[in-house]
Amino acid sequence: MIAVEVTKMLRRPRTWVTILMLNALPTLIAFLLALTDIGPRPGEGPAFLSSVLSDGSLFPLAALAVILPLFLPIAVAVIAGDSVAGEAQAGTLRYLLVRPVGRTRLLIAKLVAIFVFVLVAVVLVAGIAYVVGTSLFGTAPGAASVSGTILTPGQVAVRTVLAIGYITLSMLGVAAMALFLSTLTDSPLAATLGALAFLIASSLLFTLDAADALSPYLPTRYWLAFVDLFRDPIQWRDITRGIALQGVYVVVLLSAAWANFTTKDITS
Amino acid sequence: MISTTGLTKAYGRILAVDDIDLDVREGDIYGFLGANGSGKTTTVRMLLGLVLASSGTIRVLGEPMPKRGKTVLPRVGALVEGPAAYPHLSGRRNLELLDAAGAGGIRRTRRTRVNVALDRVGLGGVDKRPVKAYSLGMRQRLGLASALLRKPELLILDEPTNGLDPQGIREIRDLLLALHAGGTTVFLSSHLLAEVEQLCTRVGVLDRGRLVLQDQLTTLTAPTGNSVVRTPDVDRAHALLDGRVLAKDGDRLIVTGTDASTLNALLVREGIRVSELGPDRRTLEQVVLEAAGNSGSDRMPAVEPAIPLEHVSTRETSG
């Protein structure tokens, strides 16, 4: 079933249009930087972007930092919000369920397919950004870590892979929320917008000092912790917290989705 | 093959399906009749475990549903409220995905299974066009093909000839008869009386969520014990047979008694021309209208003094 869901997702033209669009903004930024040679000052703009002019191999990280706060979660919300509600709207949900596909299995297969989507999207963004970055800006023998020490290209590569993994996991909270909403409604749009509202609320509360007590529990709280992978030594504290927090969101929301979906009348 | 006891589905205070006891036997072609909105689709969905019953029990293929759906549903082919497919994929690809989704479909023989199913419904030569380019009739055939993928013992079909042209309807009818001859039990829900009358051996009639009739078709449309006389001299015939005439409709008279030859002799002796004479049978339409009343469930009159308001509201049932 998981294979079927992944195949379905990968065979959809929309999946690839979404991934293409995710690549558009970082690539545009790369060209603008290369043309003007004006980088943001260190500490401003998306993470790593200031270092890109001197070392193109850091551009994948900059590209990920560009899409992470908004574009990637929107893409995740669109795909995940569509996952059950889209099948309901198209009428295919009832045929899957009488095949029969167990409702629990379907839900898990959907979540795995979303995870695969995020992984494919993030890897492609990083890969394309690497090609664009190194060809526009060239590479330096070693990159400066966020802490100021020098990382070898090998270290940068390993840590970039870790960052890709962390960012993929970071999207699971939004994905689980969109999936849960997707079981509540037969309208993919409603599920997607609901998940985005959840995301925006989280980002907003994060900036509000009065909501400090809530901030450790916000799904977006540890998203930028992937920067910590480029400190020397790596600071794991926020990264492990971030992964644990996403895990909690997945467990809670997937349980809610399961409780709702397995007892729901399928009238679509 | 299908039996329900006291099957009920309530949406809030509205009873969509009200205490029905279905009895579909092996080898039946069962026609499940009812106006739009009478609860047919809700019943079909409950049989398949899509909608959960409020009360009552369901047994399909001898096993309780939806509890044993995992073992029951692979042996059932279903078409529920119109076909559905992924519009950007071809029909063949759609069937392959559906076949791969459920348990038990061996990958090696998948292509063969899909081709056999497509052949059966007359789509054997279908090309790589995506389903979004299909006509309504082609989609309907594709839906039927997906129901036939697993060589089901029981077919549950909701309005299977929707969107087909007369020739297509005939093809599907022949297909269903062939499947039936091969041992498949067919449960067919429809609002088309003619379709059911031509195809079915057993009929159930749903009216506003209640099963008002369930019997063999031959019993329902058996001769009534009266005769029908058609004559251009209808007034003279009426005068002659006065006392025996039960009803008069244009040039048709319904006369008590089944002895057509005596009746004919009597009429001819008086010089009354007879254009048609035979036993009186009720049509399925008459039977259904009598059982269900002649108001469709989707009618919602503002005032209907014969029925208390409370009942009027229960007519707003979902299809």
Image: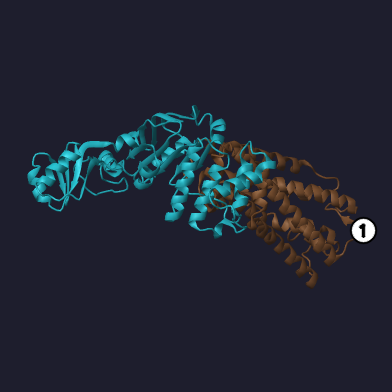
Chain colours: A brown, B cyan
Front residue of this view, candidates A101 and B11: A101
Which amino acid does the dot numbered 1 rest on?
Pro
Is residue A20 in view from this perspective? yes
Residue at (77% x, 51% y) in the render: A227
Task: Give the vertical position of A55 relative to B303 (above or below).
Answer: below
Q: Where does label 1 land, which residue?
A: A141
A156 relative to B142 in the view: left or right: right
User: Is A41 in front, or is A116?
Assistant: A116
> Which residue extends farthest right?
A141
Q: Is residue A150 visible?
A: no
The picture places residue B151, in percent across and down from the top left corner, at 56, 39
Q: Chain of mark 1?
A: A
Pick whichever, A106 or A230, lies toward us: A106
Q: Position of residue A49 (x, y in %)?
A: 78, 61
Q: Nearer the viewer, residue B101 or B255?
A: B255
In the shown orientation, is residue B310 left or right of residue B267?
Answer: right
